[in-house]
Image (cartoon, helix red, strand yellow):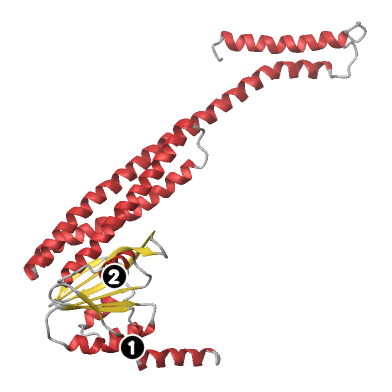
Amino acid sequence: MTASEKPAIDAARASADAAPATGIVWAYRFHGDGRAEAVASDQIDAALKEHGGGWLWIHLALADNRCRAWIAQHAPLSDMAREVLAGPDKHLRLDILGHEIVGVVPDLQQELAQESDDLVRLRFVMTERMLITARQQPVHSVESNRRAIESGKRFPTAVSFLDAVVDQFADAIGRMAERLGDELDRVEENVMDEEPADEQRRIGRVRLQAVRVHRQLAQLKTMFSRLEPRLAAHNKDVGTAIGALAQKLDAIDHEIGSLHERARLLLDEANAKVSALTNKRLFILSILTACLLPPTLVTGFFGMNTKDMPFQATDGGTWWALGIAFAAGALSYWALRKMRAL
């Protein structure tokens, strides 16, 4: 550590230790009827200690050291839940730890105006009265539901909110599937109407995105199916919501799988068309070579500076030699036609 880096690191540590809750992105208290009320950062610890009705949602940005400090020092969670919430593990998971349900689920990264196609991770810990979510990069589903809350949408339970988050992810994947399908439609038209140019690269991008999404959906479906009975025994509402989401994800995964298969077939067709065009051009080149080879032999013969060369003393000898060259080419063409090579 250099002398110039030490003050900055000390300042960051002091900021995190002084008021960790100030690093929380946002927090909402939901009343029994689902109505949301924003909670200031300096009131979060007090809100967690309240024992009234409703539940509390806290959203964290793991890129901020103050959020990590709040998780370690103030979050009313078990050690295992803290590890899942702030840990580096990017594998998808969904577990029941006593009265806590912890998970790492996929989501799409949120850009300025809309979601991107980049897959990121959303971590959460849920209890009966609390839901804590954390992310490294902004995520689309959480941002969409926050805007819905600001517009007056109600979430009476933490389960209903988590259900809406996963449902938003499923809807975003559905929109992505539509965009990928439109891209394949355009590529297919180009393959049918024109000579393929960069269609193979475009199809490759679609296949890569479809494979990535399918991998995430397959893991998510497997987790939901495996834990649905346990979740239903732990909380019937959670089990019902997870079962409905698993069915929706299965339908979307089927659509993504269809896109991947369609892209594979379209890539085969584009490759076949490129091969056919290449073979056609090679055939034309071979025919030209076969037709030009005999005239080349004739001109090479008359180009030898040897004694007794024909037509040296004949008037118009050059034209006679040229006629012989053309005749040799025509004879080659006739022979190719006779052998049905053309």
Position above or below: 2 against 209: below
Residue 240 horizontal/vertical position (percent): 11, 61
Which SS class for mark 1?
helix
Residue 198 horizontal/vertical position (percent): 51, 42
Which SS class for mark 2?
helix
Task: State which mark lies toward you, 2 or 1.
Answer: 2
Position above or below: 74 against 109: below
Residue at left offset 33%, top offset 49%: 177
Image quadrant where residue 101 sits? bottom left
Residue at left offset 16%, top offset 62%: 242
Name the residue beneath numbered marker 1: 20
Residue 45 horizontal/vertical position (percent): 24, 88
Tell whether 94 sits left or right of 283. Answer: left
Query: Residue pushed farthest top?
Result: 315
Label 1 amino acid?
Answer: Pro
Name the residue beneath numbered marker 2: 146
Q: Is residue 271 visible?
A: no
